[in-house]
Each structure stands twice: as C-alpha cells, then as structure tokens.
Image (cartoon, grey):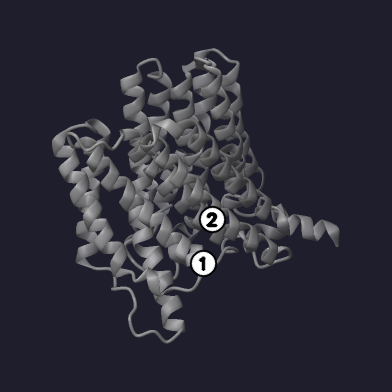
Amino acid sequence: MAPHTRPLPTNALSLARSPAMGAAPRRITDGWWLAVAFRPLFLAAALQAAAAVPLWIWIYTSGIAEVAGLPAMTWHAHEMVFGFLPPIMAGYLLSATPNWSGRLPTAGRPLALLVGLWLAGRLVPLAAPLPLALAADAAFPLAVSALLIREMRLGRSGQSRHGLMLFPVLAAAALAHRLLGDDPEMAATMARTGIAVAALLISAVGGRLVPSLTRNALAGRGAERVPAPYGRFDIFVLLATSVALPAWVLAPGALATGVLLAGAGLLQLARLLRWRGWLLRRGDILALHAGYAWLVAGLLLAALSALPYSGVPADSALHALTTGAIGSMTLAVMSRLATTRGPGGHAGQRLCAVALLLVNAGALLRVAAPLLPEHYLHLLGAGAALWSLAYLLFASAQVQPLRSSVSR
C-alpha cells in the first residue's frame, strides 16, 4: 500500500475505488488473470494465509522444534510477516505505480515470474540448506524492490514515494530475519520491524482512503456531518506513530515506549472518531473502519503491555496488530480491489462480506487467548480456523469471474 500526500484521482485512492484500474492496456494480450499485479499476488497471499495458520497450529500442538532451518516460532513469524505481507504490498504498489510513473503496469510473463519467485521462497527453504534457502527467500522482495526503485526514479515530481521506500525496508528486514533466525531476540526485533512497516502504511494510506470513501458515502446520502478533511492533525498523528512504532521495535517493554505508544494510540483513536464511521450503512467501508480500529487497539494494548503490573500480555498486543490490524485491513482493501464488476462479481462480493466478518472474529479470539490462559488452546484453534477461513473465502471470491466465464 502506498501513501500519497495529494488526494488526487490518480493516486492509490482511485485504485481502491476502481478495481479494474491498470488492467485495460494489457488485458487483451496478457489475459485477465495476469493483466494487473494485485490479482495473482493477492490470491497467492490469501492461499498462504489460509494454509500457514492451520499448519502452525498443528506444529505448535505437536511440539515440533524446527521448520525450514528455523526455530518453529521464528518460522511462523517469518511466514506470516515476511511471507504474507510482501505479495500484498507488492500487488498494491505495482498496480498503483503506473498512475504516477506513466509506464504500463507489470503484467504477463514478468508478473508470472514474480509469483513464481514468491512461491519458491515459501517452498525451497523447507528442504534446502541456508544459502539456497536465503537466495530463494530473498529473490521476490529484492526483485520487487528493484522494480519499485525504478518507478521512484521515473515518477513525476510532487508524487509521494514513501510507500515505495518502505518496501525495501521490509525486504531488508526479511533477509535479516532469515539470517538471524537462530537468535530469538534479533529475530523478534526483525519481525516487529516488518509489523511496524505495515502499521505505518495502514496509518498513512488508511488516513486518506477511509475518510475519503466515508465522505463520499455520507455525502451521497445527503448527510451534513462528514469526515474532517486531511490536515495538520493527521500529519501530527502520523509523526507520533512514526516515533512510537520504532521505539516498540527496539524496546517493546520499556516504560518510555509505553508512553509513546499510549500517546500514538489515543491520537489514532481521536483520528478514527473524526471519520464518523458510526453514520455509515455500507459494510465494505465499515470494514475499513474496523481494520483501523484494530490499529488503535494494537497500539493501546502494546502500551499497556509495556507498563508495569498492567496484566496485558505482549502476545495480545502483537496479534492485535497482526491478525487484527494487518489481517482485517489488508483483507478489506484487497476485497475492494479484487472483486470485479464482471461475471461472478456479486457472488465474489458476498463471499468477501462474510470473509470480513470472519477475519475480525478470528482476530478477536486470537487476541483474547493470552488473556484467558485456561481457554488458550481452544481460543487459539477457533481464532485460527475463522481467520484462515476468511482468507480462503477471499481466494474463492477472486476466482469467481473465472468460474463464471468458464461456465458460459
């Protein structure tokens, strides 16, 4: 997801409003499926999420100590942060960059190659020694980083490039996480780095996308009270969050970190309330508000977990940011992009609506599990089942147009 400083119709906001953007120039030659980056990359991430979480529950309950040359817990973090996030970010960014670079979108065989590199990064490390595993795991984020750096150089002046710059940070953290996987403390720091990158992007992009869509929906109903326009307050909230999250990455248990996180969380809460989501009647936009609310909850829970005697486990805060904020917000944004208006579109939208309910329910159970240790395994299993089912339904929604066209 790529934040932009100008709410123009040619930025990421228009991409989220129009799922088919970027597909037309290459659709005839490359086919519908590989015409735009978000389609195959979102599907890859969704299938990985649907499979990796149940697999992790089995690994955890079976007591398996090592997977793919990493401690089992480190492997789980690696797959859910550095396996799951990069294709989502890449799909969004590579679909949006033509709006400011003027180049045709990455499509066809180059896009298929990128998907193959991502798949190799998930499978090769399961059986290969460290050097080969590292090379396979690094190929996708490095290739996407190279493409985005090229777009940064070609982009028109005045266009924000912060989203493009953050993806290489995620790629570097992914490599460091694989290399330092035997050191639990360093591996945890790198995983928090990836989570912080995603949280910053949610704050930046959500801060424009959510109020913009809300404003349009409320204005269409003739409502007098609409979200406040983007201004200095939003910039201040982003700055506060940009200070608090790096502190959480480096020292999650420090008292000063707790204070910074509490301040950022309260500011984000005020920001969310300014968007007047309770006036909405559209489920797809409410889902974006819910995803942003998880960001608020994650920051505040992380603040409490850093304070002495709060009783809030760090695990709950971590999963409020991951299964909650990242899991629900990315699914809400992906659903807007991936459900087309072509054949099967209505069926796909219904599946996505159910998926958005399930992903939030699954996140709630996962965050509650450490708070209720006597029911931990039951809540863990139920949360994982709901969360994974949500992404499986999203994957099914993505291929609805193909199913409809084949049946004709």
| Above or below 142: residue 214 | below
- CA–CA distance in space, label 2 to label 1: 9 Å
Q: In front: 396, or 363?
A: 363
> Few, some or many C-alpha atoms within 10 Å of disc 1 (few <14, some 14-19, many ≥20)?
few
Residue at 50% x, 45% y: name it: 362
Residue 27 in percent (x, y) is at 68, 59
Return the residue at label 1.
283
Residue at 53% x, 56% y: name it: 357
> Few, some or many C-alpha atoms within 10 Å of disc 2 (few <14, some 14-19, many ≥20)?
many
| Above or below 260: residue 134 | above
Q: In front: 109, or 311?
A: 311
Q: Is residue 236 left or right of residue 275?
A: left
Q: Are marks 2 and 1 in contact (CB under 8 Å)?
A: yes
Element assignment for label 2: helix
Amino acid found under the numbered disc labelled 1:
Gly
Amino acid found under the numbered disc labelled 2:
Leu
> Which numbered dot is residue 160?
none
Is residue 307 visible to the viewer in this orientation of the structure? yes
Residue at 38% x, 70% y: name it: 278
Element assignment for label 1: helix
Residue 163 in percent (x, y) is at 37, 50
Which quadrant of the view contains residue 349?
bottom right
Residue 259 in percent (x, y) is at 15, 44
Q: How many marks?
A: 2
> Which numbered dot is residue 356?
2
